[in-house]
Amino acid sequence: MGIEIPFDVATIAGPEAGDVAPPEVIGSYISSASRPLLAVGSEMLRDEFFIEIAIEIGKKGIPIAATGHSMRGFVEKGYTENVYYYNLHELTNCLRDPNWKGLDGAGNYDFVIFYGIIYYYASQMLSCLKNFATDPLMRTVSIDRYYHPNARMSFTNVMPRMEEEYKKMLNKLVESIKG
Amino acid sequence: MEELKKGGIFTISDLQNVRINIGEIVEEEEEWEPMGPHPMPRIATLRDWDFKLLNRYKPFYAPVCDMCCLCTYGKCDLTGNKKGACGIRMDAQQGRIVLLACLVGCSAHCGHGRHLLHDMIKKFGRDMPIDFGPEVNIEAPLTRLVCGIKPKTIGDYDRVFSYVEEQIVQLADALHTGQEGSYMDFESKALHMGMLDSLNKEAADIIQIACYGMPSGFPGDGPDVPFVDVGIGTIDTNKAVIIVIGHNVPPSADIGVYLTENDLEDKVELGGICCTSIDTTRVYKKAKIVSALGRQLRVLRAGIADVVVIDEQCIRADVLELCQRTQSPMIATNDKAMHGLVNRTDDDPDKIVDDLVSGKVPGVIILEPDQVGEVAVRTALQMDKKRRSLKFILSDDEFKYYVNDCILCGGCTLACPNGLRIGEANKSAAAGNIKPLADLFDICVGCGRCEQVCKKHIPIVDVMTKAAYPQLKEEKGRMRIGRGPIWDSEIREAGAPLVLGTIPGIIAPIGCGNYPNGTKDAWLIVKEFAERNYIVTLTGCMAIDCALWKDEDGKTIYEAHHGGFDAGGVINIGSCVSNAHIHDAAIKVASIFAGRPLRGNYEEIADYILSRVGACGVAWGAMSQKAASIATGFNRLGVPAVVGPHGAKYRRAFMSRPDIKEDWKLIDASDGSDVYVEPGPQDLLVACETVEEALPMMAKLCFRPSDTDRGRSIKLTHYIDLNQKYLSAYPPDWHLFVRVASDLPIATRDVLLKKLEDEQDWKIDWKKKKIEEGPIRGYNPSFNPTNLERLIRRKK
Ligand code: SF4
Ligand code: SF4
Ligand code: SF4
């Protein structure tokens, strides 16, 4: 854990700012969820590796909301089981409602993983959940290459020259999520 | 008819001649249509309508800041929907901030309109007639609808602005600590503000059309109005160059007049940035559009302007500093943006020109528009000679030095609103490949935040501009000048296909250039929908940005499509204030095509539009507070809007829940029965992450309960096709929009019926090719959808 500045430096919302955490910690945090959801955005499409990571997480039994146009990546890889297209704004609108039935009709989620989403858009959606999805508390993490203070936990900012390092972090994260 | 009571309250008994009393003036209005129920609505008048919208499209909040610091009880931490010391909760505080944004936006248009009215009355007199020719009889749909006034002269707009100004003050009052406490009521107030904003825009555009003879409904005025050059590459820098920036056209119009009267049109280039440029092309044929808002910093830095003239709105706050850097004298022409300069209105033009040319002062203020032309042109002609040898684009050596100097620290990326990876691009440029850096030019929104944090003091914007310079010099687009109001005859022709759904919708790209991924997305949106026979109506920066790109045949989107309000039309309506004509087109569909009364009848018309007019705005780069009030004004009228991902920072969205059946109960006005319908339109304000996602979303937001089966099948075709094209999949909710088999496109009907059977468990009678069971409702061609009980014709 450590102190970090937001990826878009002015994104300092207030007294409650999430922690920077290493992949193993985020992985075990995810493992503690009873109904987790992975929300994936279009930035995932920039490299096949990132799509594969999403699929790996999906294979651990975590349903995937493919937001933006990330659906393409899953279709191209032939992995669409447990993957649902959803607009991220509309998805967050549902997530904030404890009575929402979820993507599978079995009820709302208690944990959302944000991944591959444009920074400021994800940040706003995390802000909604932080402020309004509080009863019951919805836990959120970001596994993007950005520090997201509106998530309860996120990675640190990863500069482009550290791309390989980031890929290793994602691999470690996947390993540490208990299926 | 009863006498009106004093104090501005209407009592209308027999709806004959109606008197309108707004305080001091009492005037007899000729009867042109009986007065409707809500002339000049106040804050609470249309609240029931707002609540109908807000209950279906529940306000969604994503705070940008979790605190409030508006009074000395604070700062208060509102995280987790806590209450501040004054008792306000986070949700209401967000509604309050939204209302504040709409207040600022609405005030900008109102202030602009009022300012324009003052200037125009002074120049042309109060009695300047509003006559838009034989093609536009309903000259001011919003003014008629909201105020119950049919304006005959520009002087009639005094009353309209007085009404708006009073309402703005009342709404601003509600922002004070210890006033409103409900987020729903803050939003109802924001919707009221949005409606007022639409009225302001109409007023401003009508006044300038009337006074300057901008295109309207006279023979030769359209629909295919003339073309104009767009792009930095179209400016002939061998001439003296004047660049105008902002939104209020009179000073620029005066420059055009001076150039014409003094035979200087071939010696001086008059180009503009943002909406003033669009409006200048409506009054001065040789004007050019240099760029939209997003390139302002870079155009100024490039130093092409021998004089910069600013008026109001969307001007960089550091404009004077930028002008000084390139030795371009600046003339401020509006009391809202004076930048610390000295007011030289009524001063001797010779002296002003001398002071500007000698560099004694960096700029001046001239508040009389009719004094601007002479000073601007004479200064530009002299500065052109002085500035000819100056170069502002980096030399090759400077460029090399800077890209090599970058230490890849990433500071710029953290400061950049689009998170651009500049360091990496510098690295490639240093290694000899400038393409990544040149490619960033269009995605960059030209804010300059990166440069302020660069530890190596690299002028990043200049470095990027240098890399992109070869393309930039070739940036030569074409667009049609703003054509203003849609003709009544066009509405007569297009009204039926729009309501029946056979023209699948009106797509309205509007507003600013804070795009997530560059201007090409603006072009793609227009192209995709125009080619699908939607009607595309544009205003403001998106109208400019989409003109920068060309198809394989070298044609811009305006050149490839006709400019009429009909299937496949691509119409530049005009500047930001002109976008009231998009509201007006929807209103005129209700009035001209459907014969609904207009006067003081906002609620009924909005109800009609929400259920029947498949229109969808898109503000892909929405940035300003004006964009907030514009979108909110569209929403109150029943028109949804899609914004780009930056739009999520507006904090509030309006999205429905298709899974909550009760939210989708409409009334059939024919017999008063309740009808549960499909979610059309599903949202009133929603952000999409990428343009690929936005395209199918816009198609979805064009579904309306009134669609005929033929219209629905066309809309479904596009919705499904756009999903397959951009998201590689069927939309997960397409079945919600199917009522009967004939709603399905003929070409794919069997495939789709099979999918409904397999994936949704619908019962299909394959012999008859009929849907037996499954849809939310069946198709009833005489369904007369409404949200308003009072419109029920006959109770069952
Ligand atoms: S207005 Fe209310 S919430 Fe804001 S600082 Fe004052 S007491 Fe706190
Ligand atoms: S000027 Fe361009 S590159 Fe620099 S911070 Fe702004 S958007 Fe980013
Ligand atoms: S801030 Fe300056 S030195 Fe650092 S990466 Fe950006 S351009 Fe290079």
Image (cartoon, helix red, strand yellow):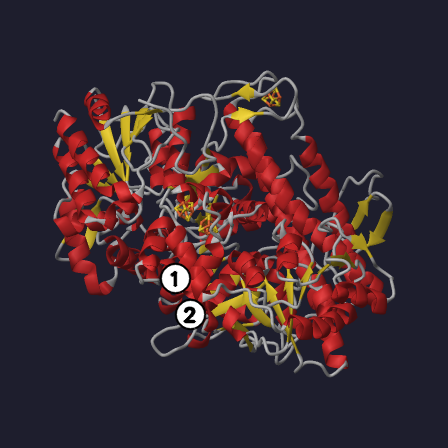
Is residue B87 positioned above or below B632 on the image? above
Give the residue at mark 2.
B471
Q: Disc 2 sits on a residue from what chain?
A: B
Residue under the point 50% across and 40% down? B650
Q: Earlier in the sequence, mark 2 or mark 1?
A: 1
Q: Specify the quadrant of the image occupied by residue B592.
A: bottom right
Identified by mark 2, the residue type is Gln
Q: Are marks 2 and 1 in contact (CB under 8 Å)?
A: yes
Residue in the image at 76% along x and 55% along y: B115
User: In this orientation, which residue lies closer to the viewer: B719 or B12?
Assistant: B719
* Residue B290 picture location, percent across and down: 55, 67
Horizontal arrangement in the rendering, residue A162 relative to residue B373 (left or right): left
Q: State the SS at label 1.
A: helix
Q: Quadrant of ligand 1?
A: top right
Q: Residue at x 45, y 67 (%)?
A: B469
Location of the N terminus of chain A (image quadrant): top left
Q: Residues within 10 Å of mark 1 (few under 14, many from 20)?
A: many
The chain that hosts pointer 1 is B
- Residue B438, numbered label: 1
Residue labelled 2 has its Cβ within 8 Å of some atom of ligand 2: no
Type of amino acid under label 1: Ala
